[in-house]
Image (cartoon, rainbow, N blue to C red):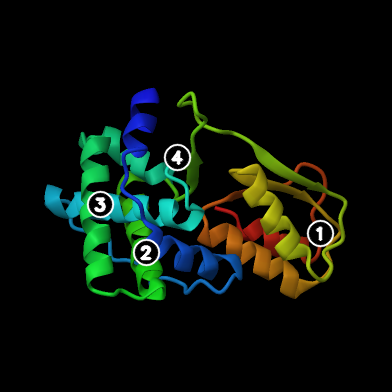
């Protein structure tokens, strides 16, 4: 894991796209990617590497953090014998191409989300954010929300807390409340690859939050 983290840290700056990406993800209005086509079994290694790199770019861009990637990316390293150094190099190459072409953030998001879904179909691992501690170990911090009614502003407050704590998921126990706020938070969880769980009770609109998690 230390080697993987050190390689991730070599990813070139992505300021040209990350600010726009982060803004799109924050309001729950991220465009939904079309159902991806699963590549044929004989997909070329070069094409596969681009799919892996784009999925990696999605997570880095959404979090503006180079200490992250996607669970499906990690799975592909073992399954297909891909080195993380190759992924980082291709990700830099792909990013330069997106910037040079003036790719809109919405189009970038849609394409990279499809890449993660495509990679998930190949590896059997669901798309989800993976974050690393400075030691290189996987970060397992979850945000807990217990007994809170889902009222106006709940989604934004929770999203802000998820970002500040750099959580990989949300444990929510709630009697429910605003469907709008619950769906907004659920969309954010899904778009950003964050997991969701309940260990007490999640009723009514809370189900929309729970269902949104990766």
Mark 1 secondary-structure assignment: loop
Question: Could you tell me how far apart the alpha carbons at marks 2 and 3 are, in whole angstroms?
Answer: 12 Å
Q: Quadrant of the N terminus?
A: top left
In which quarter of the view is residue 79 placed? top left
Q: How dense is the environment of label 3, judged by Cα within 10 Å: few (below 14), some, or many (20 and up)?
A: many
Foreground pick, 81 / 42:
81
- Front-most of residues 22 and 87: 22
Dot 1 or dot 4, earlier in sequence? 4
Mark 3 or 1, nearer chain start: 3
Q: Residue at x 26, y 55 (%)?
A: 51
Q: Residue at x 21, y 64 (%)?
A: 97
**Location of residue 31 with respect to 45 vertically, above or below:** below
At label 1, counting other C-alpha atoms closer than 10 Å, the crowd grade (few under 14, some 14-19, many 20 or more) is few
Decide if residue 166 is on the left or right side of residue 175: left
Q: Nearer the viewer, mark 1 or mark 4?
A: 4
Asked whether the beta carbons under mark 2 and mark 3 sit within 8 Å of each other, the answer is: no
Residue lying at 23% horizontally and 58% vertically, measured from the top left: 94
Residue under label 1, please give it: 203
- Image marks 3 and 1: residues in contact by CB distance under 8 Å: no
* Marked residue nearer the N-terminal end (4 or 3): 4
Residue that mark 2 sits on: 16
């Amino acid at each position: 894991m230390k080697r993987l983290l050190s390689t991730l840290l070599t990813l070139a700056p992505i300021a040209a796209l990350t600010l726009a990406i982060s803004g799109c993800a924050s309001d729950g209005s991220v465009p939904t990617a079309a159902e991806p086509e699963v590549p044929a079994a004989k997909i070329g290694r070069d094409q596969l590497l681009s799919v892996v790199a784009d999925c990696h770019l999605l997570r880095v861009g959404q979090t503006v953090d180079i200490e992250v990637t996607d669970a499906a990316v990690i799975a592909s390293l073992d399954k297909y014998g891909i080195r993380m150094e190759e992924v980082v190099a291709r990700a830099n190459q792909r990013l330069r191409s997106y910037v040079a072409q003036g790719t809109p953030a919405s189009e970038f998001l849609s394409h990279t989300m499809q890449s993660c879904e495509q990679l998930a179909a190949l590896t059997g691992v669901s798309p989800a954010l993976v974050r690393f501690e400075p030691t290189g170990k996987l970060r397992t911090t979850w945000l807990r929300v217990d007994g809170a009614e889902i009222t106006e502003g709940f989604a934004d407050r929770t999203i802000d807390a998820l970002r500040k704590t750099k959580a990989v998921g949300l444990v929510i126990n709630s009697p429910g409340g605003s469907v709008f706020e619950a769906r907004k938070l659920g969309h954010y969880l899904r778009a950003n690859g964050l997991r969701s769980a309940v260990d007490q009770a999640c009723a009514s609109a809370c189900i929309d939050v729970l269902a949104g998690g990766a």
